[in-house]
Image (spheres, helix red, strand yellow):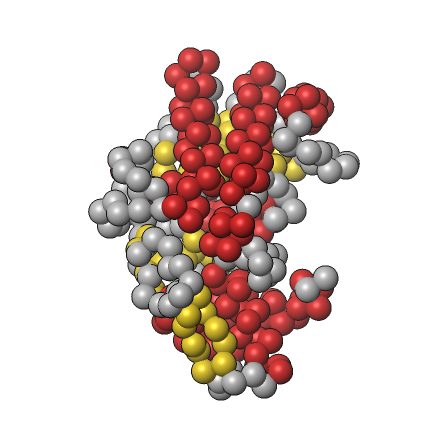
Amino acid sequence: MPNGWSRYHSNEPKGIRVYVAGARGMVGSALGRRLQGAGYTLVQPAVRVDLRDQKATHELIEDLKPDWVFLAAAKVGGIYANKTYPAEFIYDNLMIQSNVIHASHQSRVKKLLLLGSSCIYPKFAPQPLREEYLLSGELEPTNEPYAVAKIAAIVMARSYNRQYGTDFLCVMPTNLYGPNDNFDLQTSHVVAALIRKTHEAKVSGAEFVEVWGTGTPLREFLHVDDMTDACLFLMEREETAKLVNIGYGSDISVRDLALLIKDIAGYEGEIRFNPEMPDGTPRKLLDTTLLTSLGWKPSIPLREGLTAVYRWYVENADWQRR
């Protein structure tokens, strides 16, 4: 699969120790692959640490002594998960990010990159979404607890930069997809859910696949490998903005996404939309003018990326369902 890695990186040893918080997830594992391929030294704990525990998190950062930290650990999920577990979404994320940010400051980490989410922007903000729209209006109710937690992390990083002179960056990726995604239908995002539903319908010979909502909302999707390229591109710059959108640059309706995945999977049944279920925000397209002006742009087309991820899922489907 093409990616932008060779544009910015070599595999020569960098002499920089990097800790990826959340290294087992889709984003964290992608960052790990890229960092190792680029010559960075990954430092990870031998056993899993609960980052909601302040003392354990501080001891972890002190022990690992990283130069850089990527904060990819988070409780994430789609509309169903956000509606079902709102208390967990705000509590877990507030605790994880607060502990990692504070411990990084105390241990004098040179750089930290916080991965936020495009859901931080107001539900009815002008499109495409610019960085300055943060805190300019009401949030989408279905994921408000998660969004509030992420906004708190951004404000916390800004505050530490201002008071302590730290170099903490915040990036706002659009909707991500890629290998090692979460394909649990109760907690997954739309791409992973559609891939699983469509594949299982194909295998079982089901007449239709049900998709939540009307299919009209517009969403932007970025392959996780493009996202990691952008993150490292920003981290390797001596000076950069502290809040940066990372997006693909164009969007697609949920209906057209479902039909695209149907075509990729070779499924011959029907796609049925359930308008009684929530749509979420009508449109979410990030303005990436700032990032592109610095010299970065994505390189993985949506169809090509989805085809590769569908193939990965089919090869790993039995493991994913456990």
131 vs 188, nearest the viewer? 188
28 vs 281, nearest the viewer? 281
Query: Which quadrant of the view contains residue 121?
Result: top left
Which residue appears at 30% of the width and 40% of the height? 138
Residue 144 position, x and y percent, is 42, 42
Residue 225 position, x and y percent, is 50, 53
Left or right of residue 195: residue 43? right
Query: Which quadrant of the view contains residue 244?
Result: top left
**Can residue 321 be spotted in the picture?**
yes
Query: Which quadrant of the view contains residue 218?
Result: bottom left
Which residue appears at 77% of the width and 36% of the height? 46
Residue 23 vertical placement versus 4 (above, below): above
228 vs 215, nearest the viewer? 215
Residue 306 position, x and y percent, is 48, 67
Of all residues shown, which one is farthest toward the left?
Answer: 126
- Quadrant in which the C terminus appears: bottom right
